[in-house]
Image (tube, grey):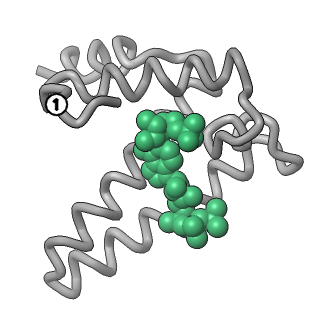
Amino acid sequence: MEPDTPPEAVLDELFATIEDRKETLPEESYTASLFTHEKGENAVLEKLGEETTEAILAAKDDDDEELLAESADLVYHLLVLLAMKDATLDDLRIELRERF
Ligand SMILES: N=c1c2ncn([C@@H]3O[C@H](COP(=O)(O)OP(=O)(O)OP(=O)(O)O)[C@@H](O)[C@H]3O)c2ncn1[C@@H]1O[C@H](COP(=O)(O)O)[C@@H](O)[C@H]1O
């Protein structure tokens, strides 16, 4: 991702990169390692649990910087899980829109 990517395009670009890693499985990619992990989907599910706990602790500590960092880890791992389950970012947007 380029440093000058507009903030509103970041999630789409990140999700497209995750889908690319799922398809091409580069050896050096952390994202690809989640798709090929010996624990299967449990690897990303465990990370989601860890990052959720870390975000909660940061919020309880009023550590705003840490909360943002852990939230980013959480969202990233959630997007990996969605890609793993063949869902798309648009599926998530539509689900949210239906709640209005
Ligand atoms: N946004 C992320 C991202 N957020 C978090 N992480 C990784 O998620 C892991 C978080 O684990 P922890 O916080 O527990 O840190 P850790 O102790 O180092 O992790 P582990 O030892 O448990 O693996 C770290 O290895 C981070 O590097 C991410 N890895 C990749 N991306 C993006 O995904 C895209 C593809 O990147 P590659 O995975 O490098 O191909 C790029 O746009 C990246 O910026």
Instruction: Inspect the image, locate mark 1, and give the three-letter code of the amino acid beneath it.
Output: Asp
Q: Is residue 7 above or below residue 45?
A: above
Q: Is residue 69 above or below residue 27?
A: below
* Left or right: 51 as drawn, with respect to 90: right
Q: Is residue 87 above or below residue 36?
A: above
- Look at the image and tell me in which quarter the N terminus lies: top left
Point out residue 96 in the picture as x, y percentages from the top left corner: 24, 23
Number of labels in the image equals 1
Using a 10 Å C-alpha cutoff, classify the residue at mark 1 as few (fewer than 14 neighbours), some (14 to 19) or many (20 or more): few
Q: Residue at x 46, y 34 (%)?
A: 79
Q: Is residue 42 above or below residue 3?
A: below
* Left or right: 50 as drawn, with respect to 23: left
Q: Residue at x 21, y 22 (%)?
A: 9
Q: Residue furthest right?
A: 38
Q: Which of the pair 6/47 is nearer the observer?
A: 6
Residue 39 at least partly seen:
yes
Q: Residue at x 81, y 45 (%)?
A: 37
The residue that mark 1 highlights is 4
- Secondary structure beneath label 1: loop
